[in-house]
Image (cartoon, helix red, strand yellow):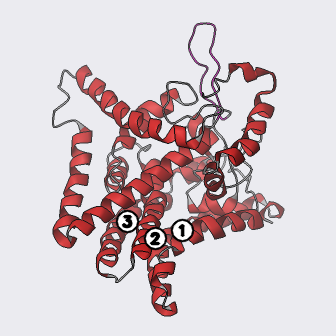
Amino acid sequence: MIEQLSRQRVLAIRKFGYLSFLLAPMLMPAGWYLGLETGMPDLMAWYPVMWTFGLIPLLDYAVGRDTANPDEVNETSSMQGQIYYRLLTLLAVPIQAVLLVWACWIFVHGELGQWGRLGWLVSMGVVSGVNAINIAHELIHRHGRLEPWAGGILLSLVTYAGFKVEHVRGHHVNVSTPEDASSARYGQSLYDFLPHAWKWNFLNAWHLEAERLQRRGLPVLHWRNELIWWNGLSLGIAAALTWAFGWLGLLFFAGQSFVAFTELEIINYVEHYGLHRRRRADGRYERTTHQHSWNSSYMVTNLFLFQLQRHSDHHAHPARRYQVLRHFDDSPQLPGGYAAMVLLALVPPLWRRVMDPRVAAYYRNEMEQLATAN
């Protein structure tokens, strides 16, 4: 449907369509309201999950793919500098903080059954993955102090501060190589990938921060170690919620964090599965281009996630803000939006049936370079 519109019309729709990011945090109060109205609070506690992984994929296929790009000469520079786009991402910080406290109160005092509490926790984790981690991903790539610090606060709200360090200094350097814990190998199942990603992304973050401090002649346990500050903020939030709501408050904070950063790592799995950078004659890897990450241009999810699915251009040009990321026809293309692909990744036989032929077709006669997971 969207393919039939002019490029200018699509860009205009996209500009205000980014306001749809507000839908993610609104799903939690919407689910609670529906639970009260229908008398089924335990079922409606799962509403954000059902909406995200049920309705969004259908809307993606109904609306279609948005392949429009801003004009590099006349539009990109102007769009890149517009404060409107920055304010949208910065708004996520107060929204996420308020939502976390309110949702924690509902979890403890909302008279939910065990099934409802589980649904409420998982739902908050899914929303945090969208509203906290996804937007933090945009912010930590920016220069200056305000936006990276805002990204650090968002990541502290889901106890995944290491992402701020490892993603920028590790993942973007080693993407689509065996050295990257966030790049899934060809043939590797999600359930083999996740424990490896959890462990090594945490350890790599501390290693990279230790290296940075060493270059300045400072020890690891120093006040300039930003991981100490961000993890300390997470501990402070955990302590505050425990003080206010008891052990259930701590359980809720830890549980929604686990769901959120697991959602992130599943998306990492989707974004880089089976892709590799070739080794050059000097033993180094080729430069990262828009051909080393999976791309998806389904418009609904891209509006919802601030163009995260234009991941190919993001890795080729990390400094580009979300509003000017481009679609490239010669990037490897996913057959669906992220919501649909996450569901597919949860079932490894189906995932491999859909994705392995696409990897093989993309590399054609180079399959011998892919290290198949054991």
Residue holding disc 1: 49
Mark 2 vs mark 3: give the one in front. Answer: 2
As rendered, which of 333 and 263 lies closer to the eye? Answer: 263
Residue holding disc 2: 119
Answer whether labels 2 and 3 touch (C-beta < 8 Å): no
Q: Quadrant of the C terminus?
A: top right
As rendered, which of 100 and 19 lies closer to the eye? Answer: 100
* Disc marking residue 96: 3
Near mark 3 (Cα within 10 A), the count class, few <14, some 14-19 or many ≥20, is some
Is 354 positioned to the left or the right of 167 in the image? Answer: right
Pick whichever of labels 1 and 3 is earlier in the sequence: 1
Pick whichever of labels 2 and 3 is earlier in the sequence: 3
Mark 2 vs mark 1: give the one in front. Answer: 2
Q: Amino acid at mark 3?
A: Gln
The stretch drawn in magenta includes residue 91: no
Is 150 positioned to the left or the right of 16 in the image? Answer: left
Magenta segment main secondary structure: loop
The residue drawn where x is 16% and y is 67% is: 243
In the image, residue 295 above or below residue 27:
above
Q: Quadrant of the N terminus?
A: bottom right
Near mark 2 (Cα within 10 A), the count class, few <14, some 14-19 or many ≥20, is many
Q: CA distance from mark 2 to mark 3?
A: 18 Å
Near mark 1 (Cα within 10 A), the count class, few <14, some 14-19 or many ≥20, is many
Residue 271, percent from left and from top: 60, 42
Q: Amino acid at mark 2?
A: Gly
- Specify the segment rendered in magenta: 274-290
The residue drawn where x is 44% and y is 73% is: 115
Q: Amino acid at mark 1?
A: Val
As rendered, which of 327 and 346 lies closer to the eye? Answer: 346
Residue 177, percent from left and from top: 56, 25
Mark 1 vs mark 3: give the one in front. Answer: 1
Answer whether labels 2 and 1 touch (C-beta < 8 Å): yes
